[in-house]
Image (tube, helix red, strand yellow):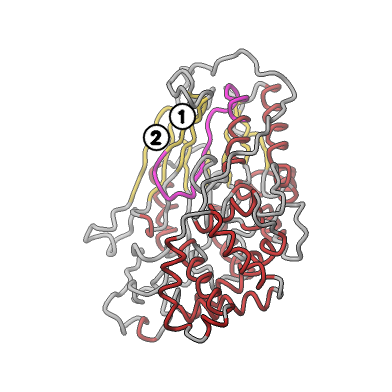
């Protein structure tokens, strides 16, 4: 995201300049020195001092906070002026809200300093033992059947840029290019013309998105279903609006309508501001209910009225039975991982919730019902729980649930990292071995070329146990001379 650790350090250093009269008189001469001092800070005490200064500005109001930080961003050259103004106008009020409510020092401020500034050790997980309706049964995972396997498709992080312009410059000063931000970057005016199927410095053009669905139709025409673990919206987060995000979601899911059946998850980019998912208990007028309204209506054609209503209210999470069950019984549970994402700044409350919006309690309820019904379960979400972007407390509590229901859960599926990888859960992390491995999370690579070659996965799956038997990853090769002259399929 735009307001990342490095940028925020620069903003804080500039803010210290503005609030110190001694420094203000020599502001331009001392910016570099102050930035060096901030980046060399290694203690939580130093970070607490920074937060106190920021908190003082936040108490002046959202407008004052946004205006001050935007000016500092521009003056220090942290980003292009339009990026400074756009990104901070969107996310600044959320950060100001956090700071006004924050006790310094505290568990919350330490976590904030860890995830935003990197100046503290990660605080210890707040101890919490998840309670379950029934004891864990003494039962093993089912052995594979002898039935003919089925295929399941997994796509993720398509990040489609509907403003991508062929011939515009792919060499720019922003985090995504292939847009004519200036006349010099317009088609015919630059030395780095973007090709029709995407560049590594740009998010996906619509042509690449369409090629993905053509490839799925060609390679796996009889796939049982497709799992989409987000994101849709491109990376120019300083320009997004609610109208644009809604249009992007409608456009993307409209193009997926040719797929047989799609199970999707709510993702961090598909809101405005980006990453903005306030839990139900947070009092704010900056609601994003429109995201859940939009997604649930788009998903309804695949998951049905009941599950769509659940997603609209839950928020973003749903549970539904796969209608193609023949020899086995599969339930798909889509889980809102944004409630545990470290860059969802709404989470940094005075006392941080252990179960934002009741997601964990709901997940236990659904898994218990599946266990009682003898169902197998797929859990899908956007961000892998246990990854570096997940808050440790949430990952710990989630892992307790996964270990309790390991015999019911067939697999977990995520995206977000843009990497082709997997993650293992263990019943005993002090003794990690095949005997203590309890679950596997399959993490799909991205379509967007910003993280490498566009790719997607196809799983070969047992139709009775729904265990993943094999994985094939398909990727387009941007380095081939023929890539831009013929469809990546």
Determine whether, in the image, residue 59 is placed left or right of residue 403: right
Q: Find the residue positioned furthest to the top.
A: 138
Q: Which residue is at 66% across, 67% downward?
A: 55
Q: Is mark 1 on a helix, strand or loop?
A: strand
Outermost residue to the front: 22
Task: Answer above or below: position of 58 versus 392.
Answer: below
The image shows residue 436 at horizontal and vertical percentages of 49, 21
Which quadrant would residue 67 be assigned to in this image?
Answer: bottom right
Magenta stretch: residue 404 in it? yes
Residue at image location 58% in from the left, 50% down from the top? 341
The answer to whether 95 appears left or right of 142 in the picture is right
Q: In this orientation, does residue 154 appear?
A: yes
Q: Residues within 10 Å of mark 2 (few under 14, many from 20)?
A: some
Q: Can residue 463 be seen in this view?
A: no
Instruction: From the top left corner, tell me how far across and down residue 455 is, in percent.
Output: 38, 49
Contact? badges 1 and 2 (CB < 8 Å): yes
Of the pair 309 and 171, the residue shown nearer to us = 171
Residue 419 is tagged as: none
Which residue bears the numbered disc 1?
468
Which disc, if any, is residue 471?
2
């Amino acid at each position: 995201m735009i307001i990342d650790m490095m940028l925020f350090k620069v903003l804080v250093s500039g803010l210290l300049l503005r609030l110190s009269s001694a420094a203000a008189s020599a502001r331009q001469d001392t910016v570099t020195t102050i930035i060096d001092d901030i980046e060399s800070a290694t203690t939580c005490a130093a970070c607490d001092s920074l937060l106190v200064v920021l908190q003082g500005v936040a108490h002046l109001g959202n407008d004052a906070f946004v205006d001050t930080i935007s000016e500092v961003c521009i003056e220090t050259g942290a980003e292009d002026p339009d990026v400074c103004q756009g990104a901070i106008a969107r996310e600044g009020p959320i950060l100001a809200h956090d700071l006004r409510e924050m006790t310094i020092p505290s568990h919350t401020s330490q976590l904030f300093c860890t995830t935003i500034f990197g100046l503290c050790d990660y605080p210890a997980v707040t101890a919490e033992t998840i309670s379950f309706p029934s004891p864990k049964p003494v039962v093993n995972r089912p052995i594979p059947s002898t039935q003919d396997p089925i295929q399941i498709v997994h796509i993720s992080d398509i990040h489609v840029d509907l403003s991508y312009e062929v011939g515009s410059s792919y060499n720019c000063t922003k985090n995504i290019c292939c847009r004519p931000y200036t006349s010099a970057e317009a088609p015919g005016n630059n030395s780095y013309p973007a090709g029709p199927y995407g560049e590594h410095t740009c998010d996906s053009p619509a042509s690449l998105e369409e090629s993905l669905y053509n490839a799925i139709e060609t390679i796996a025409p009889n796939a049982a279903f497709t799992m989409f673990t987000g994101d849709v919206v491109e990376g120019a987060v300083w320009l997004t609006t609610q109208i644009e995000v809604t249009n992007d979601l409608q456009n993307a899911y409209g193009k997926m309508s040719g797929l047989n059946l799609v199970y999707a998850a709510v993702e961090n980019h598909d809101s405005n501001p980006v990453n903005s998912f306030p839990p139900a208990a947070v009092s704010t007028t900056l609601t994003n209910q429109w995201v859940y309204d939009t997604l649930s209506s788009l998903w309804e054609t695949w998951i049905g009225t009941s599950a769509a209503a659940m997603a609209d209210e839950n928020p973003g999470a749903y549970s539904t039975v796969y209608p193609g069950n023949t020899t086995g019984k599969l339930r798909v549970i889509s889980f809102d991982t944004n409630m545990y994402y470290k860059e969802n700044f709404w989470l940094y409350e005075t006392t941080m919730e252990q179960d934002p919006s009741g997601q964990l309690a709901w997940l236990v309820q659904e898994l218990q019902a599946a266990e009682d019904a003898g169902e197998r379960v797929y859990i899908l979400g956007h961000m892998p729980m246990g990854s570096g972007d997940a808050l440790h407390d949430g990952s710990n509590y989630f892992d307790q649930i996964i270990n309790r229901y390991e015999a019911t859960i067939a697999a977990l599926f995520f995206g977000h990292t843009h990497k082709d990888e997997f993650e293992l859960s263990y019943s005993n992390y002090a003794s990690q071995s095949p005997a203590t491995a309890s679950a596997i999370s399959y993490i799909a690579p991205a379509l967007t070329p910003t993280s490498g070659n566009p790719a997607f996965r196809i799983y070969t799956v047992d139709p009775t146990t729904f265990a993943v038997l094999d994985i094939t990853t398909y990727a387009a090769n941007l380095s081939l001379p023929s890539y831009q002259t013929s469809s990546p399929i």
